[in-house]
Amino acid sequence: MTEFPDILIRVLRQAERVAALTGAGVSQESGLRTFRDAQTGLWQQYKPEDLASPEAFTRDPKLVWDWYAMRREKVREVQPNAGHYALAEMGHRVPHFTLITQNVDGLHRKAEQTLKVSKTFRVYPILELHGNIQRVRCSECGMVADAWEENGDVPRCAGCGGMLRPDVVWFGESLPRSELEAAVEAARGCQVFLSVGTSGIVQPAAALPFAAKNKGAVVVEVNLEPTPLTEKADFFLQGKSGEVLPELVRAVWPQA
Ligand code: BJW
Ligand code: ZN
């Protein structure tokens, strides 16, 4: 059981604007491996950093497509965990909540959909900074789709014949402009900024907690281990997000 400082509970309870940035750690308890965990089986010989790039796709499109196909299947098999639900509950409780995620698994949206069945549930923006693995995009014309024909090879665009690729953001590529702008605005305008389950090394997402801190926000980090943010954070809650976040929500909103 985590003991939370009274001041943290008070600040969160009174906050009108809260932003949360999440990374792969938040989905770890759903059964998805984090981005920088060692890979297993056939994929052991590859580093994820070497597959998630436009250069890798140009060099060997089938290899990159197959890696994403394997991960897409895993994502389809798993469900949001207590950490995703705690963030969704926070979204419902805080007047202006913004959920910023680097994850491409769509589990935050799934958690929100589950809780939204109640008519009184307050919706909040979910900004997917690195795209979504369940969508594809044509590498030639940019057409985006969430359904396509599998043919054992890299599927082709029905419009122009270009190769389809996952609609995610690879190293060296730009993040979707409106999502990034909204994330920066949320970070600069919030009273509390939570950074959850991210190693905090991939830019520009990693800069968001620092932008919040520079504008006077209270920065709270939840992670299994320290990261480059930890020294700057006002509170470091060490532990699993699926355990720490539900406890935090119960401490701040005991009626939840
Ligand atoms: C738990 C837990 C539990 C585990 N509970 N916690 C400025 C300076 C230096 C470099 C750059 C820079 N600006 C841009 C760059 C280059 C690059 C970059 O940042 N490189 C760094 C590696 C140095 N950035 C880019 O290229 C970005 N584009 C860009 O900026 O364009 C303009 C530009 C280009 C080039 C130069 C300059 C400007 C694009 C970045 C796109 C990242 N895409 C990926 C792949 C997405 C698709 C896919 O999934 O395959 O996004 S990479 C990968 O990293 C993925 C993740 O979203 C992202 C972040 O990883 P995350 O989520 O933090 O996961 P992990 O595994 O690293 O960490 C997990 C954490 O959880 C750990 O801390 C655990 O302890 C913790 N944990 N279990 C709580 N139960
Ligand atoms: Zn096309």
Image (spheres, helix red, strand yellow):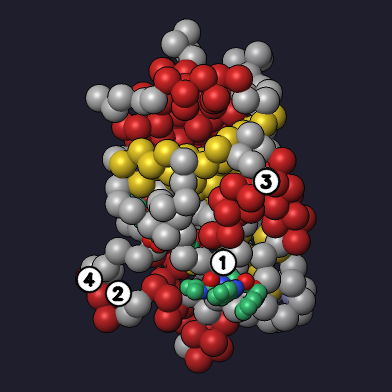
* Furthest-left residue in this view: 41
* Labels 3, 1: front one: 3
Per the image, label 1 sits on a secondary structure element best described as loop
Mark pair 1, 4: CA separation: 29 Å
Q: Is residue 218 above or below residue 75?
A: above
Per the image, label 4 sits on a secondary structure element best described as helix
Q: Are marks 4 and 2 in contact (CB under 8 Å)?
A: yes
* Labels 1, 4: front one: 1
Would you name the residue on which mark 1 appears? 203
Circle 3: is it few (<14), some (14-19), or many (20+) Cα within 10 Å?
Answer: some
Q: Is mark 1 within 8 Å of ligand 1?
A: yes
Q: Is mark 3 within 8 Å of ligand 1?
A: no
Would you name the residue on which mark 2 appears? 43
* Left or right of 79, for residue 128: right
The mark nearer the N terminus, 3 or 1, is 1
Q: Quick one: quadrant of the N terminus? A: top left
Q: Which residue is at a point 47% across and 23% down the rendered structure image? A: 7
The mark nearer the N terminus, 1 or 2, is 2
Would you name the residue on which mark 3 appears? 215
* Labels 1, 2: front one: 1
Mark pair 3, 2: CA separation: 42 Å
* Left or right of 226, for residue 203: right
Query: Dividing the image into four equal quarters, which quarter contains ligand 2?
Result: bottom right
